Image (cartoon, rainbow, N blue to C red):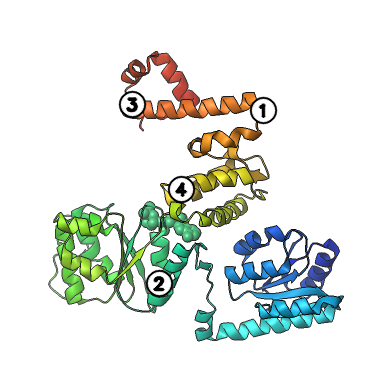
């Protein structure tokens, strides 16, 4: 049980070192933090089982840390250190959810006993499945991260419906986490030990999609040398994930509807009826009600698929999650690339928060990945961000800390890039037309394209 992670937060470095030494001698893994402002970010990534925090610290007090940790994951155990004279404040902390307190100064044994008792308690709780659902994290759910009311509402729905067998339709713009949500529902369902079968309705042509879904018998068509089970069969007792269901042709929609109604189907070229039982989670980026009234989506199928609707909120409508997600991705990529990057500077974060994120979380993930690999700093700064993010920031506030000449150059560069990108797009990549329109010669356009690595295949 001693492989549990313990986060220790105290502004006194000696105290941190002492505690870590005592606990590590007893095979606990410790992470020490002397700046309480960093605690939440580190806890988000490290997911400790237990947090030991001093109550009185400059910059941020232990009570605030306690609240943050409980919001991050209500099952994290928090123990507070307190000066002997102020046991009263420890009592307040316990009323607020701290598990225990340790009065300073304390002996190695006192520390160990308190920590072990707390972790034993947690283990007992974890063993109890019912309790576990009650203490489920409210701040992140599986790998889905977010503290905004909008995403919290999604967690609430997932928890409520995962164990049912109802089919689910997830609406959402590209990159909002539809697939992540579908996988989370599967993992939390009674079907978790069976397959999760994703099918991308856009990627497959009608013929291919049909033989993929239904499978085929040997000799069913030219090239069908052996019989092959379809995805429906593989999804038996599991979850079928239909990505972009609105892009299915009417023929396939009708066939799918029949399978859902009859819970049976035949392989292409086969005569035996095969029983299936699967739950369908579908996603769509288009309005299916409109598709129905345009006669491109079958209404009966819609009602079959859409027993429960989940709407993934776009990132621009939950700006409070940008910081949390950005830090999460930063830690992930910094670890992966073994780079020592400590955080994101205040003005870079302002730009991230001000941007409208048309590509949602996937775009944020890409921006942070790129910045992490490009930066030479210990912090991500505005210069590490892609230019189109900077353009969006109000009147170039991001350049305010640069010397005038550098700021002007940067600003002009980003203007130039955007101007020519738009120009070339409008001219469909035709350089002569673009040159004419801009009133400059072709050579200049080529030079600028090279400078900004603008692609002709835009
Ligand atoms: N709330 C979140 N917390 C952490 N990571 C997230 C979150 N939402 C999405 N992601 C990550 O963002 C990326 C895009 O998510 P996902 O593929 O689930 O989105 P999608 O809605 O299916 O996108 P598309 O419509 O483009 O297929 C993935 O790498 C996913 O892990
Ligand atoms: Mg997807």
The residues tagged by marks 4 and 2 sit, at their Cα atoms, a distance apart of: 25 Å
Q: Residue at x 62, y 26 (%)?
A: 406
Mark 4 against mark 1, which lies toward the viewer?
1
Please name the residue that numbered disc 1 is placed on: 403
State the count of labels.
4
Q: Is residue 25 left or right of residue 410?
A: right
Mark 2 packing: few (<14 Cα in 10 Å), some, or many (20+)? some
Q: Is residue 94 left or right of residue 387?
A: right
Circle 2 SS class: helix
Q: Are marks 4 and 1 in contact (CB under 8 Å)?
A: no
Say which residue label 4 marks: 363
- Looking at the image, tell me whether mark 4 or mark 3 is earlier in sequence order: 4
- Residue matched to label 3: 429
Which numbered disc, 3 or 2, marks the residue that appears first in the sequence?
2
Q: Earlier in the sequence, mark 2 or mark 1?
A: 2
Which mark identifies residue 157? 2
Q: CA distance from mark 4 to mark 3?
A: 25 Å
The quarter of the picture where the C terminus appears is top left
**Residue 35, x across and y down, in percent:** 74, 58
- In the figure, is residue 347 to the left or right of 287? right
Looking at the image, is 215 positioned above or below residue 440? below
Residue 146 in the image: state x and y as whole percent. 51, 62
How would you rate the neighbour count of disc 4 (Cα within 10 Å): few for under 14, some for 14-19, many for 20 or more? some
Q: Position of residue 227 (x, y in %)?
A: 22, 65
Q: Quadrant location of residue 89?
A: bottom right
Mark with earlier residue (3, 1): 1
Q: Which mark is residue 365?
A: none
Point out the frontmost of discs 3 and 1: 1
Q: Label 3's element?
A: loop
Which of the marked residues, 4 or 1, is nearer the chain's N terminus? Answer: 4
- The nearer-to-camera label among 4 and 2 is 2
């Amino acid at each position: 049980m001693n492989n549990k992670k313990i986060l220790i937060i105290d502004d006194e470095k000696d105290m941190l070192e002492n505690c870590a030494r005592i606990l590590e001698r007893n095979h606990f893994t410790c992470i020490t933090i002397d700046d309480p402002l960093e605690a939440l970010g580190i806890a988000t990534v490290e997911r400790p089982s237990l947090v030991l925090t001093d109550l009185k610290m400059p910059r941020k007090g232990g009570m605030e840390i306690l609240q943050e940790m409980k919001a991050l994951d209500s099952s994290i155990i928090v123990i507070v250190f307190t000066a002997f004279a102020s046991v009263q404040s420890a009592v307040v902390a316990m009323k607020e959810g701290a598990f225990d307190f340790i009065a300073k100064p304390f002996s190695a044994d006192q520390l160990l006993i308190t920590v072990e008792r707390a972790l034993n308690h947690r283990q007992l709780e974890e063993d109890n499945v019912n309790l576990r659902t009650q203490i489920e994290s409210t701040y992140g759910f599986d790998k889905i991260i977010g503290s905004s009311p909008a995403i919290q509402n999604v967690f609430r729905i997932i928890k409520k419906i995962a164990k049912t067998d109802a089919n689910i339709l997830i609406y959402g713009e590209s990159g909002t986490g539809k697939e992540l949500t579908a996988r989370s529902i599967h993992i939390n369902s009674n079907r978790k030990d069976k397959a999760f079968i994703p099918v991308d309705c856009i990627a497959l042509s009608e013929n291919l999609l049909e033989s993929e879904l239904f499978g085929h018998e040997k000799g069913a068509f030219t090239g069908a040398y052996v019989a092959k089970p379809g995805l429906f069969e593989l999804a038996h007792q599991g979850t079928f994930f239909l990505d972009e269901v609105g892009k299915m042709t009417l023929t396939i929609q009708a066939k799918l509807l029949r399978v859902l109604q009859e819970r049976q189907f035949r392989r292409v070229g086969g005569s035996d009826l095969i029983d299936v039982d699967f739950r369908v989670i579908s996603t769509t980026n288009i309005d299916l009600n409109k598709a129905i009234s345009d006669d491109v989506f079958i209404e009966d199928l819609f009602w079959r698929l859409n027993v429960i609707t989940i709407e993934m909120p776009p990132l621009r409508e939950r700006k409070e999650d940008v910081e949390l997600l950005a830090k999460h991705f930063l830690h992930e990529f910094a670890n992966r690339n073994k780079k020592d990057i400590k955080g994101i500077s205040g003005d870079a974060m302002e730009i991230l928060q001000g941007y409208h994120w048309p590509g949602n979380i996937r775009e944020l993930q890409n921006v942070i990945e790129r910045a992490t690999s490009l930066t030479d700093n210990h912090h991500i700064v505005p210069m590490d961000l892609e230019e189109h993010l900077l353009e969006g920031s109000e009147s170039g506030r991001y350049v305010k800390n640069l010397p005038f000449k550098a700021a002007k150059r940067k600003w002009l560069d980003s203007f130039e890039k955007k101007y020519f990108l738009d120009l070339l797009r409008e001219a469909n990549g035709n350089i002569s037309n673009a040159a004419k329109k801009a009133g400059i010669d072709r050579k200049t356009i080529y030079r600028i394209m090279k400078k900004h690595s603008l692609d002709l295949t835009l």
